Image (cartoon, grey):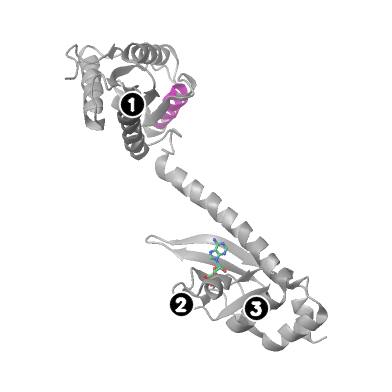
Amino acid sequence: MSITTDLLAHVPLLRELAPADLERIASVTRRQEFEPGENIVEIGDPGRSLYLVLKGHVRVLYPAMSADFELARLEGGDFFGEMALLNGKPRSATVRAVDRVEALVLDKEEFRRILIDTPQVAVELLEAMSVRIRNADEQISTLSDKAVRDPLTGLLNRRAFDDRMGEEIERVRRYGTHFSLILADLDGFNSVNDVLGHDAGDEVLAWVGRILIEHTRAADVPFRIGGEEFAILCPSTDAPLARTMVRRLVGVIAEATPPVGHALTLTMSGGYAECPEHGRTVKEVYEVAERALRTAKAGGRNQVCGPEKTAHP
Ligand code: CMP
């Protein structure tokens, strides 16, 4: 056995191959070394070879505006560069050596011939690629979750709120359903930050987030839509029920003790509106609920107001 054949026998992708097949592949692969930090393949380049990592580590990177995003880390036994060879498109990512990397390089035609001649290798390749797709799916879901979630409270953010309001309005229009929007705002929150500091302010916000999750029904969706502003979208909920819910929440906040290590009485004001009763667009429903919230604030805080009696035309 030549040295390369021996090495090939230890590459998982090729492990099912007979010695004669390995001999043939060994005769057409070349061994190559890469320095730490060297780009072995670069995104956008045409793909000419497949790389089987023998030693060292590589990072698979997707260059983004702010920094390179790491898609994966590969090590001895792994392969890369298969995608461009299979789909004829440019390299999908940059692959960079982390430390000194030793790889076997196989050119495109040879790689395709191996896949056609040896179904076991094709199956191994599919298995490895399905693991990569699954990992990529997990990364995508984590990232998209980050895009819509407020990290401090764990609640959905303003962006998610705008989307969900749009969806809920569409449901009302199509299926004749109804929902209520609750807006809630902590009273005098700035003085918490001023007196106790921003860390305590953050603790309070996270605590309010937990209360909103605990004291709403499974179908209700709480959001943090601004500094100390919260919203709750309540599907299939009419205005009287929304009123009961937000009054209960305001009561819970007023009676509970925020976990900031100091005596602190915190209150919240709330407003609500029902769709389509008080508005038929995102803007209308939001504005009615916001006006109600402002009335609650103006009326002395720690209270709840609903839409003015004039119903939507
Ligand atoms: P190719 O597109 O030819 O060149 C870049 C290589 O990076 C690609 O083939 C794969 O081998 C590898 N790659 C791209 N995306 C991922 C990923 N999400 N996980 C692991 N490897 C990847």
Amino acid on which disc 1 is placed: Val
Mark 1 lies on residue: 195
Mark 1 vs mark 3: in front: 3
Mark 1 vs mark 2: in front: 2
Q: Is residue 76 visible?
A: no
Residue 291, x across and y down, in percent? 20, 21
**Badge 2, how many Cα within 10 Å: few under 14, some, many 20+?**
some
Left or right of 145, for residue 294: left
Instruction: Tell me, yes or no, whether the two marked residues, 1 and 3, touch with CB atoms within 8 Å.
Output: no
User: Whole-Å distance between the Cαs marked 2 and 3?
Assistant: 19 Å
**Badge 1, how many Cα within 10 Å: few under 14, some, many 20+?**
few
- Residue 222 quadrant: top left
Amino acid on which disc 3 is placed: Ala
Residue 145, x across and y down, in percent? 46, 43
Q: How many marks?
A: 3
- Classify 139 as above or below 79: above
Please give the range of residues in magenta. 202-212
What main secondary structure does the magenta stretch of the protein show?
A: helix
Residue 35, x across and y down, in percent? 57, 78
Mark 3 lies on residue: 103
Viewer-nearest residue: 98 or 308: 308
Residue 45 - label? 2
- Classify 193 as above or below 215: below
The residue at 29%/19% (across/down) is 272
Q: For the residue labelled by badge 1, is the local secondary structure a helix, a strand or a loop?
A: helix
